Image (cartoon, coloured by chain):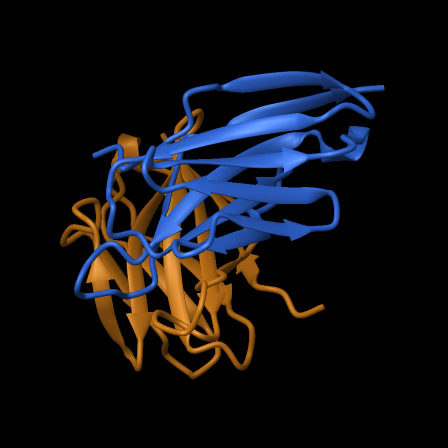
Chain colours: A orange, B blue
Amino acid sequence: EPEVTQTPSHQVTQMGQEVILRCVPISNHLYFYWYRQILGQKVEFLVSFYNNEISEKSEIFDDQFSVERPDGSNFTLKIRSTKLEDSAMYFCASSYRGPGSGANVLTFGAGSRLTVL
Amino acid sequence: DQQVKQNSPSLSVQEGRISILNCDYTNSMFDYFLWYKKYPAEGPTFLISISSIKDKNEDGRFTVFLNKSAKHLSLHIVPSQPGDSAVYFCAASGSSSSNTGKLIFGQGTTLQVKP
């Protein structure tokens, strides 16, 4: 069964450092998403990406965050200068049908745990 | 901004009995509701969905019921099995005119099925 793969599974970084989290979505999917889950809290939407541009972003997704699809297969989330409160599990997700075509079923990766010290 | 709420953080049931997980929402513009299951160290995996124009959808042991007037949905698992022990997330989509397909998640309910 096709899956979304994420690397690294765990990254530890110092506050103020840049972090890049990588994702390989399912190959025929067109819509891409990043979510995060702070320990013990709910899964929060960060950003959606379609047709090589951001289609929506949340209040959390400030200027310190950016996303890119550099080569048509990888989908990356960059945090420019990490803060302690960025410590969380980051999930990448992708979908094929997108909005307006039935339920938009997102397939999630296993997540990348980011620990900021 | 808690548009989707799961008020029970945990639920424990005996194997073979019914598990009922509840979810409330505030935005009447949601068009689809989805349930996801999450095991530790894994991402959420899709279980079942329901359109806002339906009141029931069934898939094997899993049934989702939607009560639009009460803005409430529930997931029934029957019979419950120990392998169903996981965190269950309710999610909703389609709340805005700029519908990008994002899902808004509840806080999750941890289900424990005891053998």
Q: Nearer the viewer, residue B46 or B64?
A: B64
Is any atom of residue A111 visible in this view? no
Q: Residue at x 35, y 72 (%)?
A: A100
Residue A112 % position (x, y): 50, 47
- Image coords of residue A18 (percent x, y): 30, 51
> Quarter holding the N terminus of chain A?
bottom right
Q: Quadrant of the C terminus of chain A?
A: top left
Q: How many marks?
A: 0
Question: Which residue corresponds to the image point at 44% horizontal and 24% vertical from the top-left?
Answer: A40
Residue at horizontal 66%, vertical 16%? B12
Indicate the position of residue A56 as horizontal and vertical percent values: 22, 62
Q: Residue at x 48, y 75 (%)?
A: A96
For residue B29, say whether it is visible.
yes
Depth check, front residue: A81 or A38: A38
Describe residue A64's horizontal placement relative to residue B67 as left or right. left
- Quarter of the image where one finds residue A54: bottom left
Measured from the top left, where is residue A2 in percent x and y? Answer: 66, 70
Q: Residue B78: name its quadrant.
A: top right
**Left or right of A45 in this view: B49:** right
Say above or below: A12 vs B12.
Answer: below
Quarter of image, res B105: top left
> Is residue A99 placed above or below B54 in the rendered structure?
below
Classify A28 as above or below B40.
below
* Extreme residue in the right direction: B115
